[in-house]
Image (cartoon, rainbow, N blue to C red):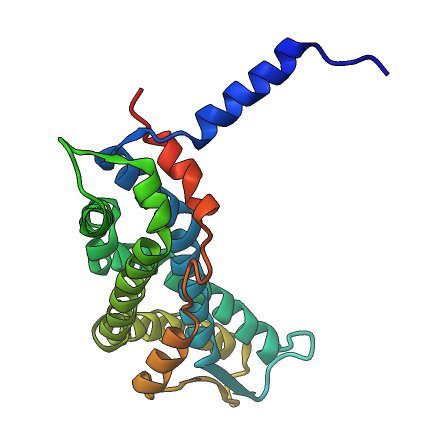
Amino acid sequence: TQALPTSYYDNQQLNYRRITENYVVDIHAFSSVFSTHLLFDHLDGTFSSLSKNISLHFQDLVQVSAQSFGINDDFVVDVELLKGQLQGAVGSFIEDSLPNIWNARASVIDKANLSIYIEQMTVEYCPTNHSTILNNCIEDNAQHIVSKVDYYIRDHLLQIISIIVKEDLPPLFQTTQSHVNSILAHFSKYLQKKASMDTFAKTIVMYHSFENAEELTVYLQSTIGLYHPSLEKSTLEKYISLARVD
């Protein structure tokens, strides 16, 4: 094998020194890139998962029963198919409605507020000089900083979920129930037209009431976990380096 030139090892050592040396970080840039990471890589997924669970809960409330007499033999009411279609429509409606609710309730953990809190927690452990801070200080205190940010997010998420279940989901349930019953009313009229003059056709939707809000709250809150339960110092280094002041 051919020996590598001396310049190669010199460059490697130079790169190593550059990596391990201390450098200055802009705290505003650091809080910005870190908050962006939390929002897009974690919170967006959390909101999506919570929305899906709420949607499934609403779909489970849909119970349909149909009783029909005198309808032509070639016309069959498939109750399970009807129920499935209604549940699908309910699920889509709920998932389309929830983003606006999240945006209204979760402003306390939006990018601006997360950035502010990250800066507050960072300067609590590291001194600043004209909005700059040393990278090694953030790295040495990464576990403390991230744990506090995680707790901040988790605490507010628990509160947000409780508020949404108590204040936003009941009226959303009423709207959804109204839509479902309207669809079933039209369907019933269609069945009656199919029935003969001296017979009777009836379709009933049994939509369970929106109860056990506390149980739903506890369930949704239980699905939230810490985003970085065991963050290593190296995990945060890329966000620190992105805020490096040249």
Instruction: Where is residue 231? Give x, y as percent.
Output: 45, 55
Residue 27 vs residue 8, the one in the foreground: 8
Tell me which corner region of the image, top left, top right, bottom left or bottom right, holds residue 171: bottom left
Which quarter shows the C terminus? top left
Residue 37 vs residue 181, the one in the foreground: 37
In percent of the image, x 28 and y 35: which residue is there?
Answer: 134
Total numbered badges shown on the rendered structure: 0
Farthest residue in the left direction?
130
100 displayed left or right of 241: left
Instruction: Where is residue 182? Give x, y as percent.
Output: 36, 71
Image position of 113 with respect to 10: above or below: below
Image position of 136 with respect to 208: above or below: above
101 displayed left or right of 77: left
Tell me which corner region of the image, top left, top right, bottom left or bottom right, holds residue 74: bottom right
Q: Is residue 10 visible?
A: yes
Residue 107 vs residue 134, the one in the foreground: 134
Which quarter shows the N terminus? top right
41 displayed left or right of 138: right
207 displayed left or right of 174: right
In percent of the image, x 70 and y 9: which residue is there?
Answer: 5
Instruction: Where is residue 82? Give x, y as percent.
Output: 55, 73
Instruction: Where is residue 33? Give x, y as percent.
Output: 33, 38
Farthest residue in the right direction?
1
In percent of the image, x 17 and y 38: which residue is there?
Answer: 128
Image position of 138 with respect to 49: above or below: above
Q: Is residue 185 visible?
A: no
In percent of the image, x 63 and y 17: which residue is there?
Answer: 9
